[in-house]
């Protein structure tokens, strides 16, 4: 009896001690896991819990997925053109005289310019002979003209009777239609008693309206009376030219009037329409010669490059083609130097590209000239002249223009086509 009770008691104590052991082991495992988690949290600053000791070192960081710089919107900016302030009484009172059914003309929109609703008026010049009133045309955004606009020249005349000089002041020109980049000038010619005197303005870039403000001075012959030009037989001509660097000069328009009418036109501003040139004036030359000039002031040397020729008369080149250019440097009527290029055979448009250096002091440039002549050796010992051109301040046309540009631009090569005359 006693033994069985002891066995039951031992079994009960063993069971209780095992249960307590299992509870202790489970609590120990939980404490170990909790300690590992706390050490892991203390190692990661982002996951560490807030505490009083670290309250001063905590920062609030907010993350954002937006880009640093905003994307730009590429749009062409609108250019607003200011409306012109019109003070003319004709334009101010224009709405009172026009019909309400007419619509104002709008210019076509170009480069996003806000020009809708603007009125375009064509005003007559106050100082011109055309007294037509201002009109408004309506034609799908573009204005048209029934007549071709010829260039207009604005000039004034003044006759100095005591000095026997005629002063023609070239003021401006307008209605010029020419390609961009072209240059031009106005030349004057006075023909009296069988003599011709030439003068021209400076060369400037052409546009729709060009201003010069230069005076052309012509010395009249001694037989001109001091009272005026009444009764004198002569003619005055003004011509507007356009020129390109490597092309022939073109005549845009010309005007001619009698020398006897200068007295009526004296001391008055004149607006004239230039007449287009005749076709006969274009084909009067015997060919063209391309030359390049440059002057070196430090070395007192004049450089002449004979480049090429074109448009030579083919009727003189039937038997043999052996072309060369003869150059003569003159001071007034004295010949200073002669040179000649090599001969080019069997080519109707020869190319030489030869440079000739000539010693010429600067003080002699104003009274010196170049005479160039194209020659063809038809047979041994026989040179046939095809045409010649003259360059200098005493020349006319392209010869005067080329020489003047060389003087205005030292140390610079200036090339120009020159017509050849027989």
Image (cartoon, grey):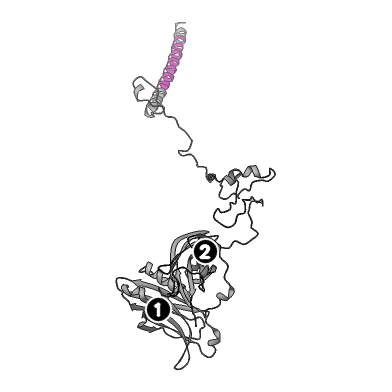
Q: Which residue, as the protein is rendered here, is positioned at the far left? A: 298
Q: Tell me where residue 60 appears, x and y as whole percent.
A: 41, 27
Q: Do the numbered discs 1 and 2 sit on residues whose CB atoms are within 8 Å? A: no
| Whether residue 49 is situated above or below residue 107 in the rendered picture | above
Front-most of residues 74 and 356: 356
Provide the residue designation for mark 2.
Answer: 264
| Left or right: where 168 falls relative to 135 | left
Kindly report which numbered mark, 1 or 2, lies closer to the viewer in this rendering. 2
Q: Residue furthest front?
A: 227
Q: Earlier in the sequence, mark 1 or mark 2?
A: 2
Q: Using the image, determine if residue 111 lies above or below residue 372.
A: above
Relative side of 413 to 260, left or right = left
Residue 63 in the magenta stretch? The answer is: no
Closer to the camera in the image, 17 or 107: 107
Where does the image place residue 109, in percent across and percent down from the top left? Answer: 59, 49
Q: Is residue 202 visible?
A: no
Please tell me which residue is depicted at 46% across the width and 39% down the height of the picture: 69
Spatial separation of the CA atoms under disc 1 and disc 2: 41 Å
| Count of numbered circles on the image | 2
Seen as rendered, the residue at the extreme right is: 101
In the displayed image of the protein, which residue is found farthest to the top? 1
Q: Nearer the viewer, residue 215 or 101?
A: 215
Can residue 104 be seen by looking at this rendering? yes
Q: Which residue is mark 1?
A: 370
Q: Secondary structure at mark 2?
A: helix
Residue 80 horizontal side relative to residue 327, left or right = right
Please report the bounds of the magenta region as a residue range: 8-31
Q: Position of residue 269 (x, y in %)?
A: 50, 59
Residue drawn at (58%, 43%) of the image: 92
Q: Is residue 30 magenta?
A: yes
């Amino acid at each position: 009896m006693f033994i069985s009770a002891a066995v039951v008691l031992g079994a009960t104590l063993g069971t209780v001690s095992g249960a307590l052991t299992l509870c202790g082991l489970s609590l120990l495992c939980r404490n170990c896991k909790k300690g590992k988690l706390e050490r892991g949290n203390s190692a990661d600053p982002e996951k560490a819990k807030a505490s009083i000791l670290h309250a001063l070192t905590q920062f609030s960081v907010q993350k954002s997925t937006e880009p640093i710089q905003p994307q730009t919107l590429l749009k062409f900016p609108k250019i607003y053109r200011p409306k012109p302030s019109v003070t003319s009484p004709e334009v101010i009172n224009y709405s009172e005289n026009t019909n309400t059914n007419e619509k104002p003309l709008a210019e076509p929109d170009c480069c996003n310019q806000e020009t809708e609703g603007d009125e375009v008026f064509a005003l007559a010049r106050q100082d011109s002979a055309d007294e037509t009133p201002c009109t408004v045309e309506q034609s799908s955004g573009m204005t048209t003209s029934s007549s071709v606009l010829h260039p207009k020249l604005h000039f004034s005349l003044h006759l100095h009777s005591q000095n026997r000089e005629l002063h023609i002041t070239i003021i401006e020109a307008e209605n010029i239609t020419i390609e961009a980049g072209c240059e031009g000038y106005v030349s004057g010619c006075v023909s009296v008693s069988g003599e011709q005197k030439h003068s021209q303005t400076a060369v400037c870039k052409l546009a729709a309206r060009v201003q010069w403000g230069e005076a052309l001075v012509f010395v009249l012959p001694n037989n001109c009376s001091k009272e005026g030009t009444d009764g004198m037989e002569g003619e005055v001509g003004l011509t507007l030219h356009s020129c390109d660097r490597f092309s022939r000069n073109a005549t845009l328009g010309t005007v001619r009037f009698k020398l006897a009418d200068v007295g009526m036109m004296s001391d008055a501003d004149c607006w004239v329409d230039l007449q287009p040139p005749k076709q006969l004036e274009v084909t009067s030359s015997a060919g063209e010669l391309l030359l390049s000039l440059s002057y070196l002031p430090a070395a007192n040397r004049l450089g002449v490059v004979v480049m090429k020729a074109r448009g030579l008369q083919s009727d003189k080149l039937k038997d043999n083609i052996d072309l060369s250019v003869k150059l003569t440097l003159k001071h007034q009527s004295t010949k200073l130097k002669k040179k000649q290029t090599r001969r080019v055979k069997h080519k109707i448009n020869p190319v030489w590209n030869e440079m000739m250096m000539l010693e010429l002091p600067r003080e002699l440039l104003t009274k010196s000239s170049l005479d160039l002549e194209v020659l063809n050796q038809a047979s041994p010992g026989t040179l046939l002249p095809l045409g010649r051109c003259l360059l200098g301040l005493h020349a006319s046309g392209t010869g005067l223009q080329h020489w003047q540009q060389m003087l205005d631009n030292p140390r610079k090569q200036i090339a120009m086509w020159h017509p050849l005359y027989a």
